[in-house]
Image (tube, grey):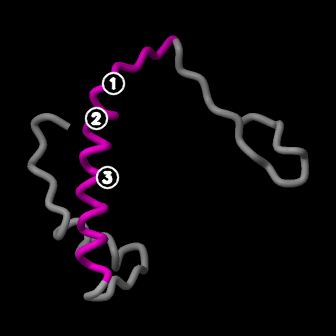
Amino acid sequence: MSGSPPFDAERHLDAMAPAIGLTITAEQRPVVLQFLGIAERMARIVATCPLDDAEFSLAPVFRPGNGGSETA
């Protein structure tokens, strides 16, 4: 995420809420903005973790009706 502009939670909320069909009330807005800020900081931490393509494997996927043991 380095080199990208600073995260603007308000701008993100204003663009994404209508795009995914969410209505955020004035009462909810401050808490949603707080969460978006937390989520962005968590994403920054995760993005700094090195990933080894040789170690990449998919996690199991739950599929109802077959006991959930089948993988993708």
Q: Residue 54 vs residue 22: left or right?
A: right
Image check: 24 left or right of 53? left
Magenta residue span: 28-54
Residue marked by disc 3: 39
Q: Where the C terminus falls, by quadrant?
A: top right
Depth check: 36 or 1 in front?
A: 36
Q: Which residue is mark 1?
A: 49
Q: Nearer the viewer, residue 46 or 65?
A: 46
Residue at (32% x, 88% y) in the render: 25
User: Label 3's element?
Assistant: helix
Identity, as a three-letter code, of the amino acid under mark 1: Cys
CA gap between label 2 and label 3 equals 10 Å
Q: Residue at x 53, y 20 (%)?
A: 56
The amino acid type of the residue labelled 2 equals Ile
Identify the mark at residue 45; answer none if there is no mark.
Answer: 2
Q: Mark 1 and mark 2 in contact? Answer it, CB < 8 Å.
A: yes
